[in-house]
Image (cartoon, helix red, strand yellow):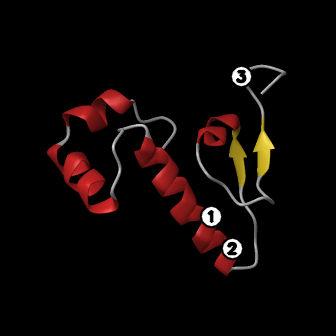
Amino acid sequence: MDECPHVEWERSAEARTRMNEWGLTRVSEIQGRFTRFAADVIAGADKRIIAWDEVLESHLPDDTVIMNWRHATA
């Protein structure tokens, strides 16, 4: 998901439909919704997620391992 330009979601009628269904107000919230879903599936397998630092912009489980690549202070 992190490689998908948000402009694609802004143009997508399907993305707008999903945003309405999920109660989202900003396109940028789609990635967070997906990340949370993935974290729940992974937790169901008694695992935890490892993610790039972009996911810091969404709500995550406390045991998420963050891999920083953008800058040292993230």
- The residue at 62%/35% (across/down) is 54
Instruction: Single out the residue that lies furthest toward the right.
Output: 72
Mark 1 packing: few (<14 Cα in 10 Å), some, or many (20+)? many
Question: At which x and y percent is residue 26?
Answer: 36, 38
| Residue type, label 3 | Arg
- The residue at 42%/37% (across/down) is 28
Between 63 and 3, the one lying in front of the other is 63
| Residue type, label 1 | Ala
User: How far separated are the C-alphas under marks 3 and 2?
Assistant: 26 Å
Q: Locate the C terminus by quadrant.
A: top right
Circle nearer the N terminus (1, 3)? 1
Give the total of numbered labels: 3
Mark 3 packing: few (<14 Cα in 10 Å), some, or many (20+)? few
Place residue 73 in its image quadrant.
top right
Residue 39 badge: 1
Question: At which x and y percent is residue 52?
Answer: 69, 39
Instruction: Decide: is 41 above or below 66.
Output: below
Residue hosting label 3: 70
Between 25 and 41, the one lying in front of the other is 25
- The residue at 35%/50% (across/down) is 24
Residue 16 badge: none
| Left or right: 58, with 19 as reference point | right
| Residue type, label 2 | Ala
Element carrying mark 2: helix
- The residue at 29%/52% (across/down) is 19
Residue hosting label 2: 43
Q: Are marks 2 and 1 in contact (CB under 8 Å)?
A: yes
